[in-house]
Amino acid sequence: MILFPYGISDFHHIRSKGLLYMDRTACISTLETVGQQLLFLRPRRFGKSLLLSMLANYYDINRADDFPALFGELAIGQQPTSERNQYLILRWDFSKVSPMGDVGTITSNLFDHLNNAVTDCVQQNQQRLAFPVTINAGNGVASFESLANAVRNSGYQLYLLIDEYDNFANEVLMQARTDEARYKALLHGEGILKTLFKTIKGCVSEGKIGRVFITGVSPVVMSDMTSGYNVATSIYLDNEFNSLCGLTSSELQRVVETVIAECQQPVATAETTLETMRVFYNGYRFCYDTTQERVYNPTLCFYFLRHFQRNCQPPEKILDGNLAMDAGKIAYIASQPGGNAVIHKVLDEQNTLLMESLAEKFGVEALQSTVQGEWFMVSLMYFFGVLTITGRGSIGELAFGVPNLVIRRLYVEELRDRTLPAPQDTDTVRHLASQFYRTADLQPLVDFMESKYFAVFNNRDYRWSNELTIKTAFLTLLFNDTYYIMDSETALQRRYSDLTLIVRPNMRQYPALLDMVLEFKYLGLKELGLSAEQVRGMSRAELQQLPLVVMALQDATQQLLQYRAVLVKKYREPQRLRCLAVVALGFERLVWEVLV
């Protein structure tokens, strides 16, 4: 039986207790050659802490006797490097530093963390340290320097591992726009973070620290420190480290097949399960080479598979609550100048989001630039893991897209929260959507959209009125990944439907849930030759007889006929499939037909 290390990032515990470990030790020799001070960035919950723990166990001089048990069966165990078990390990985890309070309080929180880490290092290496280490309660940087001096003078070197280097600074930045002053005080001038990293740089140059490995989410904090730490080698976009964190398709397939076998389910179930996990959890590429395989989020995969192992069926909630916090990253982008427009471009699959390159060095002020802000925002969204590199444009530009449906859900929820701030409206939409899933009756949903939702959309950042906007409106109201694999622009034999709601495999046991395909058309008021008042004053039957509306409905119906043939063949349940052609007349009215 596979023991999944869900929420566990302690390499020693995983190996000694027989938990599942995807071997990444082959990277160690390469890491040693690419640089002495390395910066490695990945989104949250991608296994960065486990990577650091693996490195700590490999290089820790105190773990030399454990090497055969921990690494003997792994790739590095066959050809260990000369630096194996040669360092005293000092680990910092800045996610443990509270971002609350003023700059003085945050600095004190950081000093407490540094002092605790220094104390732990001293306790682990008492027999090797020939000189005392002074713990300065009011200055953790001084305590760190005292340790570095004692280690060097005792004939050793430190390996410094910093996890989530930008965590508490990012938390300060994203709490509120007014916190930018606190953020800048921490990093700029003689801010404490800049001072700390200048000290690290000095200790490396003096031979007190042999190696430094830093993980984080984005380069923003590092960029804002400017000269504070300009010596790190960035490896987060190197092809060879694309899958250093994350799961590959082949790795996941082996695990899924094992779990399916344990549940004594048909072999075909493995294929269905893999497809579900692909659309919800795959899609991340961490390099410029678009031929490199995309990787899966490991935390989400282990959440899914651990539930499947216990219950022999997928979890109903496809989004692990531990990852829902990433919605705050999208909210932060939306709060920036022009950020809302960027989010809408992200959701427009018909017009690929293209950028000449990825910005790798940019600070907070760059994000707020009205000239280049979009470039930096797209880059930051990539580092947050809410965008990924999907390919190349016609002249080699980088193409960006949403990695998977779990991340798409976060975008949808942000848009819904912005357009439906009133709790009663949210409850109404939930009830209307639930009805629609069972009846495919658009009337109640359309009544709500025409009376409330369109007015909100039209008064916000939606300066373009087109098919995409209508589709986005429906997406925000209907998105539900408990019941559906729900996507827009779904590929159906090289044709693309606007919006599909396909019942998830584990929910197909409930015949009341319908599969649905919606095809949208948009007609502007100028195109119709009518005013908003005229359109609002006509009955739906009268609108449906307008020549342009008739043509639009016919066009949509022809496309739906093709989609229906594909979906019936694939799912073999024509009785539960509904196909709807929807035409929007400006931001005023909707008419529709159900394909029979």
Image (cartoon, rainbow, N blue to C red):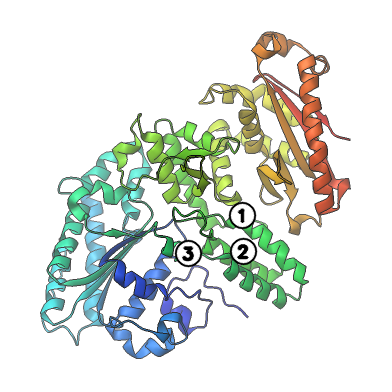
Residue 342 vertical position relative to residue 542 in the rendered view, above or below: below
Name the residue beneath numbered marker 2.
304
Task: Name the N-terminal-most of marks 2 and 1.
Answer: 1
Label 3 Cα crowd, 10 Å radius (few <14 / some 14-19 / many 20+):
some
Badge 1: few (under 14), some or many (20 or more) residues near its Cα, within 10 Å? Answer: many
Element assignment for label 2: helix
Residue 280 disc label: 1
- Place of residue 415 in the rendered image (x, y in percent of width and height, measured from the top left): 55, 36
**Residue 552 horizontal side relative to residue 409, left or right:** right
Residue with the most extreme front position: 395
Quadrant of image for the C terminus: top right
> 530 left or right of 443?
left
Amino acid type indicated by mark 1: Phe
Q: Secondary structure at mark 3?
A: loop
User: The disc labelled 2 sits on which kind of residue?
Assistant: Phe
Tag 1, which secondary structure?
A: helix
Q: Look at label 3 and name its amino acid.
A: Ser
Percent position (x, y) of residue 188? 20, 45
The residue identified by callout 3 is 243
Note whether residue 314 is visible. Answer: no
